Image (spheres, grey):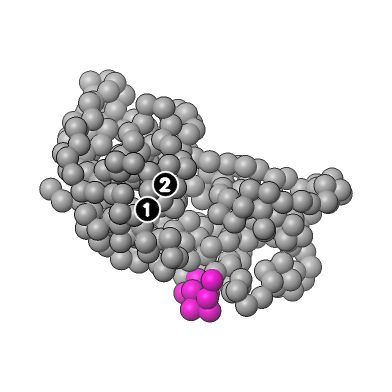
Amino acid sequence: MKAILVDSPGPETSMRFGEAPAPALRAGCIRIRIEATAVNRADLMQRQGLYPPPPGESSILGLECAGVVSEVASDVTKWRVGDRVMALLGGGGYAQETVVDARSALRVPDSLSSEQAAAIPEVFLTVFLNVFQLAAFPERGSALVHGGGSGIGTAAIQLIKASGGTVIVTAGSSQKCGRCVDLGADFAIDYNAEDFAAAVAEHTGGRGVDVILDSIGGPYLERNIASLALGGRLVLIGLMGGVKSEINLAQLLARRLSIIGSTLRARPLDEKGRIVAGFEARFAAGLADGTIRPIIDRVLDLADAPEAHRLIKASGHFGKVVLRVPR
């Protein structure tokens, strides 16, 4: 099968379009003929040798895909050959075929193309897990989401608004802030122009927010703590800005705050299956009727993966960058 290969960790030029062996079908799994995949920052880290796949997962890049079921293990009853499918992957999305545990797969609504569906699993399930399951986003609650123009940010805006909550985002330009508001964000902060903690305090009347979803890490920690309401939860899902910081721990005790560290990729398959099932139960109808939708910046061919990585690295996108996979 055709795939994007990385011969050795390195820059975007270390990727090449070549031949790879098709994965073997395993018990409990389905084979997907991939029609589209999407690029995530984790792919950039893996390409550089900084984020290896979990044991047993494909070393090919790609954490999500959409396509058609082409083979089903004998012990799988939910799926049939020919079904349209999108899936959360431990790896292997930048290829013409993948094999995935059937519990990590979701049905594609008729209203969505394969390119749109490929932009859903990784970011929407990440938001569902971290904001709604781990942080227990309260009814009519409020959240601060860093990187509102990212794939995760655009997914978070929609899921939080669909649940009746208030969402504040940060973004790197006034243009991106405007697009976040157009998408549904209640308030957007240009982090290059103002201090987000001061802006959150002003916008919330000093109360702060119930939940913060952060992929920056160290440099934001103190201001994140300051931006939380009494009993608030900070969920760290990335460390793009650095791994170290110093805070006053007395704030955690006095204001009953929680800091939660979380990743999705390495979780056990049965846990991923429960996350998928929970997301479908709560939000599948919104995907089907279009009230929740993936935001796609552009669609490129799989062979153009190096260009896609450069776009993500430069944060020159709004929403997701999708790769169309050739037949």
Evaluate if marks 1 and 2 touch, with contact meaning CB atoms under 8 Å apart: yes
Q: Nearer the viewer, residue 170 or 172?
A: 172
Q: Alpha-carbon distance for marks 1 and 2? A: 7 Å
| Figure check: 191 above or below 152 | below
Magenta span: 172-180
Residue 127: percent from the left, percent from the top?
51, 50
SS at circle 1: loop
Of the pair 270 and 281, the residue shown nearer to us? 270
Q: Position of residue 42 (x, y in %)?
A: 44, 48
Is 318 on the left-hand or right-hand side of 100?
Answer: right
Q: Nearer the viewer, residue 297 or 1?
A: 1
Instruction: Determine if the magenta segment contains residue 177.
Output: yes
Tell me the residue at 49%/33% (across/down): 267
At label 2, the amino acid type is Gln
Residue at image location 65% in from the left, 43% down from the top: 260
User: The N terminus appears in which quarter of the rendering?
Assistant: top left
Q: Is residue 221 above or below residue 199?
A: above
State the image coordinates of residue 13 (x, y, percent, origin top left).
Answer: 30, 54
Secondary element at image label 2 = loop
Q: Which residue is mark 1?
A: 11
Q: Amino acid at mark 1?
A: Pro
Label 2 neighbour load within 10 Å: few <14, some 14-19, many 20+ = some
Front residue (pair 161, 155): 155
Which residue is label 2 attached to? Answer: 48
Q: Quadrant of residue 313?
A: bottom left
Q: Residue at x 35, y 38 (%)?
A: 91
Label located before the other in sequence (1 or 2) = 1
